[in-house]
Amino acid sequence: MKLIEALEILRREQPAQGQPLLVSLVSGFTPLHLQTFLAAQLRILFPDREVKLTPGLYGDFWGNLTRLEQANTDAGVIQLEWSDLDPRLGLRNLGSWAPRELEDILQMAKTRVSQFHEFLPRSSAHFPVVVCFPTLPFPPAAYTPAWQASAFELQLRECISSMHMSAVRLQNVRIVSSQQLERLSPLNSRLDVKSELASGFPYKLPHASTIAEIVARLIRQPTPKRGLITDLDDTLWSGILGEVGIDGVSWDLEHYSHMHGVYQRLLHALSEAGVLLGVASKNDPGFVRKALQRKDLVLPGSCIFPLEAHWGPKSESVGRILKTWNIGADAIVFVDDSPMELAEVKVAHPQVECILFPKEDPQAIDELLYRLRDLFGKNAVSREDAIRRESIRRFHELGDEDGRQAKTTADFLKQAEAELTLNSQKDPLDPRALELVNKTNQFNLNGKRYADASWLNYIRQPDTLLLMASYRDKYGPLGKIAVLAGRKEGHALHVNVWVMSCRAFSRAIEHRCIEELFERHGIEEIVFDFGATPKNGPIQEFLAEILGDSPAAQCRLSRNLFRERRVETFHKVLELTNG
Amino acid sequence: MDELHVRLSRCFSAIFPSLSSERISKAQSSNVEGWDSVASVTLFAMIEEEFGIEIEVQDMEELLSFERLFGYLQQKLGQNR
């Protein structure tokens, strides 16, 4: 982004409604254009919020860091540079670089590291914090030539590594990737000496713009894609199965097809991190099933569900896979080596991200791996990620022969040995709750998404009630699948948030949750902060069924009405008391 | 109006959004509200980026009006006709 573009974005009319987005920026230098770029990037990512960016005091990085803890803000951004460890490491300070002084600089840096260890956990307890460690070239302070690493520089880098390690362990802290920064902003194009001397702003504009873009993306992390559908021939492996046979397809160095193996390795890693993998291939299904049983596959065939191998259009395969996974087209990626197949799928499913597998170009395949990591990247891997594929497979197996979602009967539920574990603890707050709230579309009371800080603020209000439900039955666990939050006012409970994973449908869990709310809180009425969205049909249907009418904003369900209309449930309810 | 004038006006407009196009041509630091040192630094950085030039620090003090900047750019870009 160019500076003029950033200013023009900021000139656009601010949104009249919506809460302001408050961001505190901690740096030791004048943030000047970095502030402009960051505000513009945040305006793009938060179009419905007025962005208010607050910088700290010039030359007082550590004071600014200390004050961050008390800031009324939605997010903090810490931009550290070498000169913040000791001013002598910056251009504007003329402190000595004499060899005898280096130890003193190092000691000062170590003191700063201790301060960092002390203050970062405190700030990040209240709101998410993005940290960007030194980006500028290390100054020629040591006595070695530039091509020789000095003990002084390495010890200072060790200090920075130690800060990295303490930061990465904190749940609410996100760190700018120095490798990504290096890819986008080469080291020798970062420092602007003239600007640093004239105005105290040390970055060239493209570097400031790149940092701002990455930081903004860490403040508003994109929702990761949830499923990947891959082609087989000349994609998952090299060769056409129908032509070369099961033993003829390859993914190894010997056959110059190694990058297909590397692609398989990435898909396996994605699968283990909870990404759903499906196959859409124009092939003989019997052949495919046998090929996927090959023991030397880097991606075990068992990671793939469902498998669509036939001679029909791939758009139909993609449609069926989406139905089986029960997720939206915008949550998946389709990879194929044929531009024609990609185009055919794109016409039928415009929201699917279609990506060409560049089978003839190993370098481009390597770049594809980075792209897929970006599309599916997440902060952490949860227990639910590990069981997602199996729970969908089991649910599908319980469906009818056409693969349609099983219509659950009381008889089925009675014998399922279902256990519902409820957790109403707010401290420590489980990050899975916000993850569910922000990614669930179908059974979602109003579709509202929350930034980390606003979710923390909401949940930590003393009168906010939280209920998180985990489910398992004799067919296996589903993990944490529902979140309900609201406030009690007199004899009514106002439910602001209610989401449930689509994997948990048809098990009467929603009925049991309502029943628990009435019983636990001794209330006579539940008021739902309902809002229709283009995707929340399932909760609309449930509310219509239980209310006897189409749901509207602030719709109410009385205890008596619920008694009349509820379905019988057979869950054994457990209470989680130790987090 | 030539292209250079239009491009420089766009820079001014980005930093001083309340200025009309007539006032931009007559703008100088003494008659534009908000034209302080930060605005100057931002304006020079933007002009350098937009026109791919370097403005010497010692020249900056002299370039505190649209007219002077326009002349400076004409000279730098070899457009002095």
Image: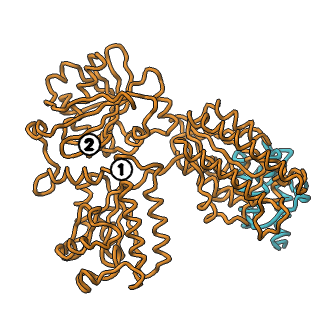
Asked whether residue B8 is in view, the answer is: no
**Chain name for mark 2:** A
**Chain name for mark 1:** A
The residue at 43%/57% (across/down) is A376
Nearest the eye: A207 or A236:
A236
The residue at 29%/17% (across/down) is A523
Q: Is residue A103 above or below residue A193?
A: above
Nearest the eye: A201 or A47:
A201
The residue at 30%/37% (across/down) is A470
**Residue A147 in picture, x, y percent from top left:** 77, 71
Give the letter of the orange chain.
Answer: A
Left or right side of A212 for A352: left
Q: Which residue bears the numbered disc 1?
A: A385
Left or right side of B75 for A291: left
**Residue A268 in picture, x, y percent from top left:** 37, 63
Nearest the eye: A207 or A44:
A207
Q: Is residue A419 above or below residue A345?
A: above
Element carrying mark 1: helix
**Marks 1 and 2, how far apart at CA:** 25 Å
Q: Is residue B51 above or below residue A573?
A: below
Q: Quadrant of the N terminus of chain A?
A: bottom right
Residue type at tag 2: Gly
Element carrying mark 2: helix
**Residue A116 in picture, x, y percent from top left:** 68, 41
Q: Specify few, some or many for label 2: CA neighbours under 10 Å numbering under 14, 14-19, or 20 or more.
A: some
**Residue A324 in picture, x, y percent from top left:** 23, 55
Residue type at tag 1: Asp
Asked whether residue A175 is in view, the answer is: yes
Q: Which residue bears the numbered disc 2?
A: A537
